[in-house]
Structure formats: structure tokens, C-alpha cells
Amino acid sequence: MPSSSSRVSDDPNNTGESSSGGNQLNFDRKRFSFAELKLVTNDFREIIGSGGFGKVFKGRLENGNEVAVKLHSESSSQGTEQFLNEVEKLSRVHHRNLVSLVGYCKDGNHIALIYEYMEKGNLQDQLTGMAQPLSWKQRLRIAYESAQGLEYLHKMCNPPLIHRDVKTSNILLTRNLKAQVSDFGLVRAFSGTHVSTKIVGTPGYLDPYYALTSQLIERSDVYSFGVVLLEIVTGKMPICQGPQGSEHLTQFVQKRLSKGNIESILDPYMGDQYNINSIWKVAELALRCTDLPDNRPDMTQVVAELKESLSLEMSSTGTVSEASGDISSDYQRSPSDNLEIMGHIGGSNLPDYAPLIR
């Protein structure tokens, strides 16, 4: 899917090849020949996106199911290792909020990944005016569902998996705006407190701690997801233009919230149907996610807080939240609560992002 952000260089991961060093793939997904892909995509007629791996084409299987075919480009910054890594990881993870891999192609020099087709594209496009504007309730549900997908990777996989490239263009949306996290080419198995690795990811979303130390931690994904939350609230890209030039979105938001002016950061395309307390909670959560590593919540905490925010939003509009189930929230933030949050924001130890802005 489209992405306006370039990637940082990658390092080799588990290739998924046999122990003998051959290219036999034993993944639990259908293997397509290149000739089959030409039929499925009607000779690669309809381009629906592009990214670091290559162009993405719309296709239709014999059973009528629509698919997205991500075809590897020779000029791609991602190689065979990332392709095999993505197939291997997606063959063993199954969650409603993770994109489903239908199959793959490894036919001579032709490499492709075949996914379920996501009619609404990606979240970045939905936020940048390429589609009908999303309401706050829709944005909040997308955030909650995406967080559930990441929580699954961190807490329910053995070993835990770190995505390493969480961003709005990697959150895909179904016809009904159900969110699924995608793009597993950089996923890394994780054990212990950290793992040393070459730095990968997308500028603006990249955890400064990881960028400066090469020490990948579970909460590096949390940082990236915090940036996603700020995008959802503001509609702005991670690197935005301020009065004195480029600044990171965290800086833009922190400056304004420290003055208690949350309305000044809201995406104007979001409309005026929202519970301001729900937005305060999400903005505060986003800044904690992008704080120093020891101050960040884990994804389980993120899911819980987004669930509470969604319940609050639903209760204020008189609707029942599917996400919150039977949970009802009488949480209401008073002006004094907002002042307490502003004090926290003003005194937080957010890293200095200036060296990372390009």
C-alpha cells in the first residue's frame, strides 16, 4: 500500500530456508506460480499501491475472493530474506487484527505475497484526505483494534515478535473499517530485555532509543504506535512543519497540550462529534507511549486504556460498544484532571528528537 515515508536500511533475518541451505519452502500457505499470478491479476492490470517491497496489484481468485498481490521489484530495498521472513511469520500468526496471508510466489526470480484484499486501503490514506474523513469514534476503534494485533505479537506469540515498522500505512482497513496490521518483512523474534540489531524502520516512527543504541526492545513498537495515535488525533504526519521549520509530531502536540489547548491539535476533518475527555485520554496515552522507554506502557496497558476511551466515547453518544462488551465507564474528566495531565506533559522527559529529523 502507498507510503510516503522511506525506509531505513535492513538486516538479514531468519530466511525460512531449509536447514540444508536450499530454497524449499514448507509454509502452510498456497504456493502460486507466476503464470497463476498473471491470471489472478489479469496480467497485473490494476495497481492499488506501492511500497518498499514493490507494487501491489488487485486480483481475484477462482473462488471469487479478491486479493492484493505484492510483487517484488528488482529495485526494491527489501530482499529475499525479508520476503521469506514475512511468509514464515504470517504462516504462524493468526489474529483478527493481523492481515491474513493467502499465499506466496517463489518462481525463479519472481517473488510475490498474496493477501486478503482490504477495500478501504490503509489508515494513512484515510487520514490524509484521499478518502472520506473518519470520525473520532471510527479512528478510536481502528486504534483499539490495531493495538490488539500488536498485543498478540508481543504477548501471545512464542517467542514474542516485534513488528519494527508500525505506522499508519501498515494498518489496513476492510470495507467496514476493521483494522489489520500488515507488513511483516521486518518482524523480529524477541527474547530477553533487548536484542542488538541493525536499525530498521521508518523515519518519524522510529524509537529514538533504538535509533541511538541499536538495542531493540519490546516497547520500540509502543513508541511507533504512540506516533500512530498522535496521527489519528491530529491528522498530521510524524514530521510536520512548525513556525521554526520541521518538528516531530510529539513536539507539536506536547507544546500545545502543555497550554491546555487540545482543540488546537485536533484534525479539522474529524468533525465535531466527539467526547473531548476521550480525546484527552488518547493524547495523554500517546505521549506516554513516546516517552523514555521506562515510562512507556506495554501493549496490554495500551489496549486496556484504548478500550476505556472507546467505552467512554460510546457511552457519550448513547451507543453500545462492541469493543467494550459489557464494560460501562462512568469516567468523566474534570477541568482539574486536565490540569493534572498538563502538568505531567509539561514535566515529561521526552527525548530530544531534533537529531532524528531529516
Image: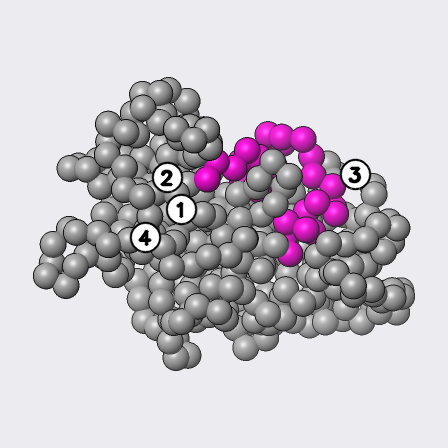
Please report whichever mark, 3 or 4, sits nearer to the chain's N-terminal start: 4
Mark 3 or 4: the one toward you: 4
Q: Which residue is mark 3?
A: 271
Q: Residues within 10 Å of mark 4 (few under 14, many from 20)?
A: some
Residue shown at the point (42%, 34%) measured from the top left: 68
Query: Which numbered disc flags the more N-terminal residue, 4 or 2?
Result: 4
> Image height check: is 285 above or below 24?
below
Mark 4 and mark 2 residues within 8 Å of each other at the beta carbon:
no
* Residue count near mark 2 (Cα–Cα under 10 Å), binned few <14, some 14–19, many ≥20: many
Q: Is residue 2 above or below residue 188?
A: above
* Residue 169 image offset from top left, x and y in percent: 50, 43
Residue for badge 1: 101
Q: Nearer the viewer, mark 4 or mark 2?
A: 4
First along the sequence among labels 1 and 2 = 1
Q: Which residues are magenta?
A: 116-144
Q: Residue furthest front?
A: 63
Q: From this viewpoint, is residue 235 visible?
A: yes
Q: Secondary structure at mark 1?
A: strand
Query: Do labels 3 and 4 touch, CB within 8 Å?
Result: no
N-term mark: 3 or 2: 2
The mark found on residue 150 in the picture is: none
